[in-house]
Image: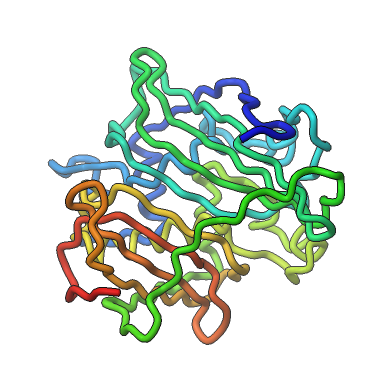
Amino acid sequence: MSGPGVGFEFPRQEVSWLKRDALLFANSIGCTPDELHFLYELDPNFAVFPTYPIVLPFKGATQEVIDFIAAQKATPIPGVPEFDPNRAVDGQRKITFLKPLPPTSEGRRFENRTTVLGVYDKGRPGTVVEVQSELVDAATGEVYTRVVGSAFYIAQGGWGGPKGPATENFPPPKGKTPDVVIEHQTSEGSALLYRLNGDYNPLHATPGPGKKMGFGGVILHGLYSWNSTCHELLKALGGSNPANIKEYQARFASPVRPGDKLVTRAWRTGVKVDGDWEEVRFETEVAGAKVCLSNGRALMRCTGAAKSKL
């Protein structure tokens, strides 16, 4: 596909993590003491929770707090307007797990390599920027994870760019009872803990930005809900084994406030993809309110819950 900005490669970004980072991430998304392989570094099966790479583009190679807004503005995309990250929210994320991460990056050099897939002008509502990011061992060229994601720049459209293609949808099966229903209670401090993974967007810490964007105050990171839901699905359907998930995606449909309860409904479809990977569809809502994660789809080896078909 061609168009403004398409194919632009951002400067390669060195990224790193310690076992301590892996422990913090697992704690921040809701891993529990019966999952010591994510929470205790001396467990014989200690593993980094598989979605951890999603935070590395924010964290980079530092252990220090960063200026989130300045980092987002650091490299403009040629051929398109310079968008304001102060008025941006997540659109959708899809991650493919190609190799399990080592418990720490120490002694090796990893890079995040990001390419623009499209910049789409949605008119008055705003602009969508879609990118692909790969976590790569710089010495060997091996790709560990591949993420396709989008950001929506609110009220920053109308610049004459392409509208973009229709997105593929994975709705829940109609008239079918979910195989699992999972509740996840967030706390008033959930966003303040999660941001320590390196995602220091002020929108999730202080009320000012959220009020300016029409959210009324602080909202949770969309990626908090995205990651915590992946954890709940892996625990409920995959025995908390990181080897039992190959792909995971969801669209950010509405904001979540700290303290909200999240309810996830998931359906095993019985459809096999790439061998023995089963397609699971899901959606997550704020209890008694709107769906916050839609278009949910995962490829898993399911070890629990009764099997159902579309």
Q: Nearer the viewer, residue 93 or 204?
A: 93
How many numbered marks have been drawn onto this rendered protein structure? 0
- State the image coordinates of residue 121 (x, y, percent, origin top left): 77, 49
The residue positioned 65% from the left and 39% from the top of the image is 118
The quarter of the picture where the C terminus appears is: bottom left
Q: Is residue 39 visible?
A: no
The residue positioned 57% from the left and 61% from the top of the image is 252
Q: Quadrant of residue 304?
A: bottom left
Q: Quadrant of residue 74?
A: top right
| Relative to 306, 176 lies left or right | right
Q: Nearer the viewer, residue 288 or 272?
A: 272
Is 89 placed above or below 104 here?
A: below
Is 91 placed above or below 176 here?
A: above
| Relative to 41, 204 lies left or right | right
The residue positioned 63% from the left and 50% from the top of the image is 165
- State the image coordinates of residue 305 (x, y, percent, origin top left): 19, 73
The quarter of the picture where the N terminus appears is: top right
| Relative to 50, 208 lies left or right | right
Is 209 placed above or below 17 here?
A: below
The residue positioned 75% from the left and 50% from the top of the image is 127
Q: Is residue 215 visible?
A: yes
- State the image coordinates of residue 246 (x, y, percent, origin top left): 29, 47
Q: Nearer the viewer, residue 225 or 79?
A: 79
- State the image coordinates of residue 249 (x, y, percent, origin top left): 44, 55
